[in-house]
Image (cartoon, helix red, strand yellow):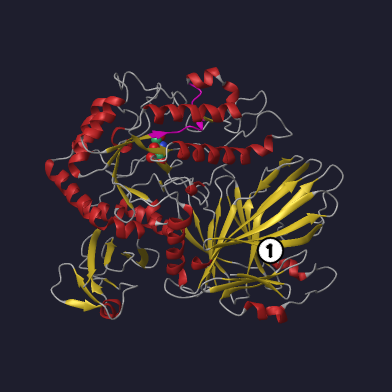
């Protein structure tokens, strides 16, 4: 519920309150555990210190319009030909209600030009979350924006401020880090033109004592798949302000008369239930409000690690036959089916079926797959092009490049300037043709294997807009494709996990979190991922080893399956080489996964034990009705004759009675949670699947 009293806006959610002042500089007064927000007038005072310090309310401002004086990160900074000072004044507000969702809009007007800003708060009360954004409308002379943020949030004073965030690299994404804030600024960001593998636009913050089960945690995610920035600033006055939005790096955007622009949405939330509760809240929120729809995820087979670029009808048919035998439901061919794509050196951009590999077209394989009882999916990388391709030879001007300069290549490719209307149309046309002519394609893996470089169309005045325009065009393409092909599922992939954020996930059903498919490395990658993203989104394959390097991993199949069963199970191994016995083993695990996948994909997830703290890794999932519980436990190797580790389930009903599969006696939830369960984990890379049912 949103109320406005005594110059305070009070947002009451299920378990939390968010309170800020009105006026030209709305300043946060409180954000945390639920209280009587309307009583907080006594805390509102103009705070000052000396003439060297600005009004201290600005350290906690909700949205900083740059007016020539700002000590901290501001949210909007513009340039007019004769001034760059904004004098924004609070005009009025409105509250819109739509079902259970309420939206608060504060309107501001610039004193010196017809420029209006709307600061938007979308409230999701049952999740204790707010979506923050700003819409800027110009009704006057052209204005150049050089800083555009979604908003700022402030944390009440704490003894310490620990920021938890994800960092990474290709094949090593979603590494969980803790950083204590000292006075000054700490920034996580992407400058690669996509969400990036180096940081993810998500964070959590506590006072250094919160754990999985308890403690106040403030958290946020930015829904944007281009250059982004989240800055944490701590002042000597104990103010902590977090500002998120589009990165200032190489950014500028011209808003013409009559135009408007809306920032990406920064989603923020608060919980008293520790990091575990934060993640469960986010998982349910994403399933409910972000993802395009709710649909049980199919077990897929992907041929990439088996056949690489050598995707041929015969070998794929053979793989498909074996995949069907073991219980796969969706057969996906990866890179290599089109153009002269025999390696990563050529063919990208030429979206016709390669006749040598598929003499009778794609349909032969699609029909085969359908006859085997599976659905069919396909890989594309529409934003990129190899220099050695017909597309590039025909349209060299379609790629980002600085005037008269050869653009830089990565993985032998360039990036298309998809903000150009004809390039965007080209993508819509070939994707429309592919999906229209092959109505049995029910899944698209959309890849993007290059960071954006040489982002220019040879026009110094508008080049800096291209970073942003790329993302807008991408979203428009996905939106249009989803509308035209509502039954097709989409996966977001970018050389592994470089495009995972709440912006793209409005259109994608799932994502590929990493090209690292080693089951042990995946435990850490998946754990980092689980902090902010739902298991339903996370695909995980059982493969022969990890792609792209010469390391060999010796992990039993049981361990590989258990690791991959913790999200959306897929198979990526070269199953055409397998013995009947191994295929049977695979079939057994896939059948087991199908029994519990609803619990894993849509249940409540509890991180019971982490490799960050012990050699035991254990994750529990409880079905939405509380009746089905699964635990995956892993041990990597014993040292010093260590004791056999136990797991302590969480989230059970203490008085309820449960049956652990394989045990004779039934046990109460309180017994299980407090006395724990033996895992019987003994050897190297041993793992256990524990299945519990409420009686
Ligand atoms: C990178 C992806 O992450 C892989 O899964 C695979 O699709 C390759 N690209 C194909 O080029």
Determine the residue positioned at 28% across, 48% down: 553
Question: On the picture, is 531 further left or further right than 194?
Answer: left
Name the quadrant containing residue 669.
Answer: bottom left
Q: Is residue 338 above or below residue 472?
A: above
Q: Position of residue 126 (x, y in %)?
A: 49, 67
Magenta: predominant secondary structure element? loop
Q: Quadrant of ligand 1?
A: top left
Task: Point out the stretch of residues depicted in magenta.
Answer: 379-388
Which residue occupies the foreground of this view, 290 or 563?
Answer: 290
Question: On the picture, is 641 further left or further right than 527?
Answer: left
Q: Position of residue 414 (x, y in %)?
A: 53, 29
At mark 1, the secondary structure is loop
Determine the residue positioned at 78% across, 74% down: 46
The residue singled out by tag 1 in the image is 62
Name the quadrant containing residue 493.
Answer: top left
Q: Position of residue 418 (x, y in %)?
A: 57, 32
């Amino acid at each position: 519920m949103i109320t406005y009293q005594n110059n305070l806006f009070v947002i009451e959610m299920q378990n939390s309150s968010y309170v800020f002042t009105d006026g030209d500089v709305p300043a946060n007064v409180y954000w945390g555990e639920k209280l009587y927000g309307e009583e907080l007038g006594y805390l509102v005072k103009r705070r000052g210190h000396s003439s060297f310090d600005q009004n201290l309310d600005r350290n906690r401002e909700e949205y900083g319009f740059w007016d020539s004086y700002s000590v901290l990160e501001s949210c909007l900074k513009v340039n007019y030909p004769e001034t760059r000072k904004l004098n924004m004044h609070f005009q009025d507000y409105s509250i819109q209600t739509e079902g259970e969702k309420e939206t608060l809009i504060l309107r501001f007007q610039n004193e010196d030009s017809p420029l209006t800003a709307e600061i938007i708060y979308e409230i999701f009360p049952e999740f204790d979350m707010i979506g923050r954004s700003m819409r800027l409308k110009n009704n006057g002379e052209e204005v150049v924006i050089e800083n555009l943020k979604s908003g700022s949030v402030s944390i009440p004073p704490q003894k310490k401020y620990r920021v938890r965030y994800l960092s990474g690299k290709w094949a090593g994404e979603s590494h969980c880090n803790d950083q204590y804030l000292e006075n000054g600024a700490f920034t996580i960001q992407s400058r690669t033109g996509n969400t990036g593998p180096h940081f993810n636009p998500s964070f959590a913050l506590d006072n250094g004592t919160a754990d999985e089960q308890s403690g106040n945690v403030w958290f946020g995610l930015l829904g944007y798949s281009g250059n982004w920035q989240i800055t944490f600033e701590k002042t000597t006055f104990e103010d902590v302000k977090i500002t998120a939005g589009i990165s200032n790096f190489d950014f500028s955007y011209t808003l013409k008369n009559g135009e408007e622009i809306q920032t990406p949405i920064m989603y923020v939330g608060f919980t008293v239930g520790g990091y575990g509760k934060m993640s469960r809240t986010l998982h349910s929120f994403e399933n409910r409000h972000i993802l395009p729809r709710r649909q049980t995820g199919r077990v897929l087979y992907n041929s990439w690690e088996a056949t690489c670029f050598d995707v041929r009808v015969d070998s794929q048919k053979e793989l498909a036959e074996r995949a069907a035998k073991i219980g796969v439901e969706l057969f996906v061919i990866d890179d290599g089916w089109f153009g002269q794509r025999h390696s990563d050196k050529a063919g990208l951009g030429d979206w016709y079926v390669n006749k040598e590999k598929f003499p009778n077209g794609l349909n032969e394989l699609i029909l085969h797959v359908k006859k085997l009882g599976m659905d069919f999916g396909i890989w594309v990388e529409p934003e990129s092009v190899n220099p050695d391709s017909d597309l590039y030879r025909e349209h060299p001007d379609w790629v980002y490049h600085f005037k008269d300069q050869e653009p830089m290549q990565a993985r032998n490719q360039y990036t298309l300037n998809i903000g150009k209307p004809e390039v965007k149309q080209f993508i819509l046309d070939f994707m429309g043709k592919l999906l229209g002519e092959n109505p049995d394609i029910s899944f698209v893996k959309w890849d993007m294997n290059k960071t954006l470089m040489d982002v220019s169309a040879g026009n110094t005045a508008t080049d800096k807009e291209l970073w942003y325009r790329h993302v807008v065009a991408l979203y428009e393409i996905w939106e249009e494709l989803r509308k035209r092909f509502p039954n097709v599922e989409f996966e977001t992939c970018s050389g592994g996990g470089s495009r995972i954020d709440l912006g793209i996930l409005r259109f994608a059903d799932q994502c590929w979190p990493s090209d690292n498919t080693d089951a042990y490395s995946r435990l850490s990658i998946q754990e980092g991922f689980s902090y902010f993203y739902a298991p339903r989104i996370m695909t995980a394959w059982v493969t022969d080893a990890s792609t792209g390097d010469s390391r060999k991993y010796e992990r039993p199949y049981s361990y590989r399956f258990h690791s991959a069963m913790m999200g959306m199970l897929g198979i990526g191994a070269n199953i055409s080489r397998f013995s009947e016995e191994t295929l049977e083993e695979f079939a057994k695990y896939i059948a087991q996964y199908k029994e519990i996948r609803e619990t894993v994909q849509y249940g409540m997830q509890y991180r019971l034990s982490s490799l960050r703290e012990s050699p035991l890794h254990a994750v529990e999932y409880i079905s939405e009705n509380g009746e089905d519980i699964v635990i995956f436990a892993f041990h990597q190797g014993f040292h010093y004759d260590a004791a056999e580790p136990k797991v302590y389930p969480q989230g059970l009903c203490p008085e309820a009675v449960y049956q652990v599969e394989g045990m004779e006696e039934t046990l109460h939830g309180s017994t299980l949670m407090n006395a724990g369960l033996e895992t019987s984990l003994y050897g190297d890379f041993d793992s256990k699947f524990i299945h519990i049912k409420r009686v």
